[in-house]
Image: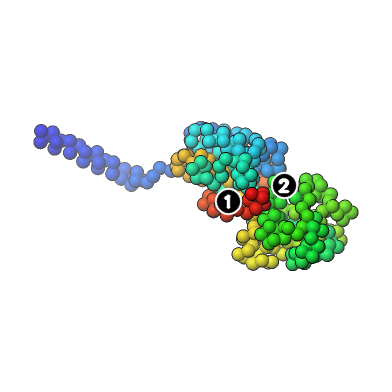
Amino acid sequence: MKKVIALVLALLMVFGLAACGNGGGGNNNQAEAPKWPDGDVTLFFPYDESSLTAVNATTMADWIREQTGKKAEVEYNKTANGWNLAEKMLKEDADGLTLMVVGLDALTGYVKGDWKNAPFDTTKFQIVTGFTQPYPYSGCMLITQADAPYSNWAELEAYAKEHKDEVLVADRAGSIMTTKLKSLFNQTGLSEYVHWVPASSDSVKTGIDPSNRSINIAIFDETSAVKYLQQPDKYKAIINCRPDNDFSYYAADTKGLDDIKKVPTLFDVFGKEKAEQYNVPNTTAIICRAEVPAEVVAQIKAVCDALGNVEKSEDANSFYVRQRVNGGTSKYYAFDAADIQKEWQRLEPVIKTIEGK
């Protein structure tokens, strides 16, 4: 029996040494790089296929196909701010092959009761990575008529408080830009002094025209606002709802960039702390089931983040050339999942006030 035990111990020692061997170069001690999930991807997108934001999903799907050689199909459904898709994803296998692109609409849907779980609920979902187009901290400008009796935020605030309900503000319910607008108005207390006018995208453009004036204040994204800034005889900007003065992500030859830079920002008017508090970043995230293994999530993140770090990737640069020809975006940005998690948690009470919850 002693001989048998000695033989077993000897064999165990041999196998143990083999397992610890350096294989000639020592690389066997290094963890194997994570691999893309074994299969084709379905990317859920909570908007219409005809939506302007659909470029986010189609661009990411094209990129995944190009980088992994796997199929990547997009499924659209905007019902309940995308909850139908989220619920469907929760019933799929936790293999990382079902992903979902979500934005702030998902958080709004949760506050309104459409989503049964918050998109940052870690018992149900995990945020793989954040990516967006355009840059999430880009601003949205408050535009008014050129002859309005206020030309900056302080004057608007004073006038609205002295003339309650006379300032007509466009309310495009559900729009991320209106969320940005109401975040500012609610937190500064100005919301109760203005009159909110239900509006659509078309009626906003018509109403803000000086010949109409059914709307006095409308909000437009920075680049859309340029055409108004370039008509100083008809329009002027009150404030740019961005938390900083960093325009470095714009190309130097961007049309109207000098005009954009002249408009006071949240940072200029309220300082850094309040600017960050009032700001609503337009961040898009890719989420999956909470149970998807960490190594699978790491590989999905690596592929997606490569698109968000386009300056560092020759593949991404050539990819963008083709996307622009097809009307695609010119740039993406990658954001840390933990930062998005924290930001959405911060914004939940803000959106509750906006939705009257």
State the image quarter where residue 41 is shown.
Answer: top right
Residue 344 tag number: 1
- Front residue of 130 and 319: 130
Q: What residue does disc 2 label?
A: 173
State the image quarter where residue 295 is shown.
Answer: top left
Query: Taking 251 as reference, is 68 above or below it?
Result: above
Q: Which residue type carries mark 2?
A: Ala
Q: Residue at x 88, y 52 (%)?
A: 212
Tell me the mark number nearer the camera, choosing from 2 and 1. Answer: 2
The colour scheme of the drawn protein is rainbow
Q: Position of residue 190 (x, y in %)?
A: 72, 60
Q: Residue at x 20, y 37 (%)?
A: 11
Can you name the residue that lies furthest to the left here?
2
Q: Position of residue 197 (x, y in %)?
A: 78, 50
Q: Position of residue 173 (x, y in %)?
A: 72, 47
Distance from disc 2 to disc 1, alpha carbons, whole Å, reads 19 Å
State the image quarter where residue 83 is shown.
Answer: top right
